[in-house]
């Protein structure tokens, strides 16, 4: 188990790995495993909840959002040698969450297209999970937006990210971020005016 | 950004935060993450790709839809044409074609898989046969003497019958390959192998007539010394017909054949072969 490895080398000096021992391949691998495991734990304690909520806004399902975020953490653990930075790791996690949420929505669309319609008196399990979100008219209106506009709005107004960060996370240009945000807000204008 | 837009943004932010603040992750996510990190790498990657695979399959099915429809229409047309020629009605035929299409796809898939497996098995068999043939053609002990003599015996004769009946030469060379019978080595390239040092080129045609004319069917021109008309059935006689079945070749006269035999026997004298004595001495008698 990789998380057990840091405890397996308790006497190893950690600070030494920053400068001098990076060239040492064996110690680099050990420190890489060590850092990845610790980074997962550290980022989990600080950002897991917000990432799950971000994913919930995108996929509208708490359990699926948790799976998405956990997958993103595992992917970050695998890519930790490329990251080596908490800030980059958080950006990687956000991007991973957005991409995996897209995949989930795509998969759900395919499943919904082929699955038989449930009877009206038998609500689906997902319906119960998202009922909490649909109490707000704004959230319900947010659901009707196109995926890119919804992502841009969520990242901007829930994640409080800048346009550059949103562009990096969504993999689009800053102009496209501006466009998606403006169109999304315009589409929600009626609901938002009612809310105010 | 205008004031109204800013207000809309603030409202949206407040609503989003107030709504999602009520959401709490269920269960211990860190334990799940650590448990999944403990899995093997391949299993972890498969788990990460699990949502992509059905989409890929769906995309593949959608892309192949036109192909399936083409096959379906052709099949239906063929069935309809066949039914009309048979004098059946159209409506039942369409029904039967539709019902047949339900199992046509899996049947085609299974047939394709079977074809692939059979092709693979045949390819492996051929490769194995080639390797075995190479190994038998070049045994460790006779790698220098066996194949050249055998090849010279069949090809050097210039007789197409020799090349047309490779079974005899292959049989001899393969029977000699185990190395248990040194006489076998001698018999195939009879002069060349018996006198490795000074094999005259004159002797090279001498083995050629014997294998080419050593067909199991006794020819009417064969000389009397063939002791038994059935030398081939015995397994030890695999090399026998090359020598015993020594009817003169078509293009040679009896005197020439005798000279060739004598030359071969003289060349083979220094290496007595205990195993092939009955078959080798048979031609030596006359």
Image: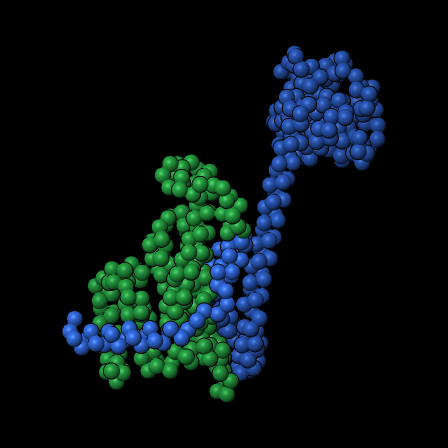
Question: Eyeballing the image, is B78 above or below B194?
Answer: below
The furthest residue to the bottom: A121
**The image quarter in which residue B283 lies:** top right
**Camera-side residue of A17 and B54:** A17
**The image quarter in which residue B160 lies:** top right
The structure residue drawn at horizontal position 65% and vertical position 36%, both measured from the top left corner, is B132
The image shows residue A18 at horizontal and vertical percentages of: 37, 41
The structure residue drawn at horizontal position 25% and vertical position 62%, both measured from the top left corner, is A162
Drawing shade for chain B: blue
Question: Eyeballing the image, is B145 above or below A129?
Answer: above
The image shows residue B161 at horizontal and vertical percentages of: 65, 33
Question: Eyeballing the image, is B114 above or below B161?
Answer: below
The structure residue drawn at horizontal position 46% and vertical position 51%, both measured from the top left corner, is A37
Q: Quadrant of the C terminus of chain A?
A: bottom left
The furthest residue to the left: B2
The structure residue drawn at horizontal position 64% and vertical position 32%, both measured from the top left corner, is B135
The image shows residue A84 at horizontal and vertical percentages of: 37, 48
**Residue B223 visible in this rendered orientation of the protein:** no
**Residue A162 visible in this rendered orientation of the protein:** yes
Drawing shade for chain A: green
**Camera-side residue of B19 and B111:** B19
**The image quarter in which residue A103 lies:** bottom left
**Camera-side residue of A137 and A27:** A27
């Amino acid at each position: 188990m990789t998380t057990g490895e840091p405890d397996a080398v308790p006497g190893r000096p950690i600070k030494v790995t920053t400068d001098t021992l990076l060239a040492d391949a064996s110690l680099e691998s050990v420190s890489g495993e060590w850092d990845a495991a610790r980074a997962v734990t550290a980022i989990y304690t600080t950002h897991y909840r917000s990432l799950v909520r971000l994913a919930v806004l995108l996929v509208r399902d708490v359990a699926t959002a948790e799976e998405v975020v956990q997958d993103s953490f595992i992917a970050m653990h695998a890519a930790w040698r490329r990251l080596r930075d908490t800030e980059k790791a958080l950006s990687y996690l956000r991007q991973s969450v957005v991409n995996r949420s897209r995949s989930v929505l795509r998969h759900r669309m395919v499943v919904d297209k082929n699955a038989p319609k449930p009877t009206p008196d038998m609500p689906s399990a997902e319906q119960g999970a998202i009922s909490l979100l649909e109490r707000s008219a704004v959230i319900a209106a947010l659901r009707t937006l196109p995926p890119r506009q919804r992502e841009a709005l969520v990242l901007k107004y829930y994640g409080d990210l800048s346009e550059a960060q949103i562009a990096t996370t969504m993999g689009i240009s800053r102009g496209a971020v501006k466009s998606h945000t403006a169109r999304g807000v315009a589409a929600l204008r009626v609901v938002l005016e009612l809310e105010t | 950004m205008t004031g109204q837009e800013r207000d809309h943004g603030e409202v949206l932010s407040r609503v989003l935060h107030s709504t999602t603040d009520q959401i709490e992750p269920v269960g211990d996510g860190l334990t799940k993450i650590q448990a999944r990190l403990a899995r093997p790498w391949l299993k972890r990657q498969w788990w990460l790709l699990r949502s992509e695979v059905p989409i890929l399959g769906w995309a593949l099915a959608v892309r192949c839809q036109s192909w399936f429809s083409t096959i379906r229409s052709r099949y239906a047309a063929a069935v309809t044409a066949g039914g009309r020629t048979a004098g059946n009605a159209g409506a039942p035929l369409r029904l039967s074609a539709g019902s047949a299409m339900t199992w046509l796809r899996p049947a085609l898939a299974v047939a394709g898989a079977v074809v692939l497996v059979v092709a693979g098995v045949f390819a492996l068999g051929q490769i194995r046969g080639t390797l075995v043939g190479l190994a038998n053609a070049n045994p460790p002990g006779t790698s220098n003497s066996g194949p050249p003599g055998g090849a010279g015996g069949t090809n050097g004769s210039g007789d197409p019958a020799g090349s047309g009946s490779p079974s005899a030469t292959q049989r001899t060379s393969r029977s000699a390959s185990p190395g248990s019978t040194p006489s076998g080595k001698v018999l195939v390239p009879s002069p060349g192998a018996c006198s490795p040092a000074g094999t005259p080129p004159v002797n090279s045609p001498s083995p050629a007539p014997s294998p080419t004319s050593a067909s199991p069917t006794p020819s009417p021109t064969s000389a009397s010394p063939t002791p038994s008309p059935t030398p081939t059935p015995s397994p030890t006689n695999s090399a026998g017909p090359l020598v015993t079945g020594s009817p003169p070749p078509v293009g040679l006269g009896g005197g020439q054949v005798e000279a060739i035999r004598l030359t071969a026997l003289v060349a083979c004298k220094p290496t007595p072969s205990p195993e092939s004595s009955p078959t080798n001495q048979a031609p030596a008698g006359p």
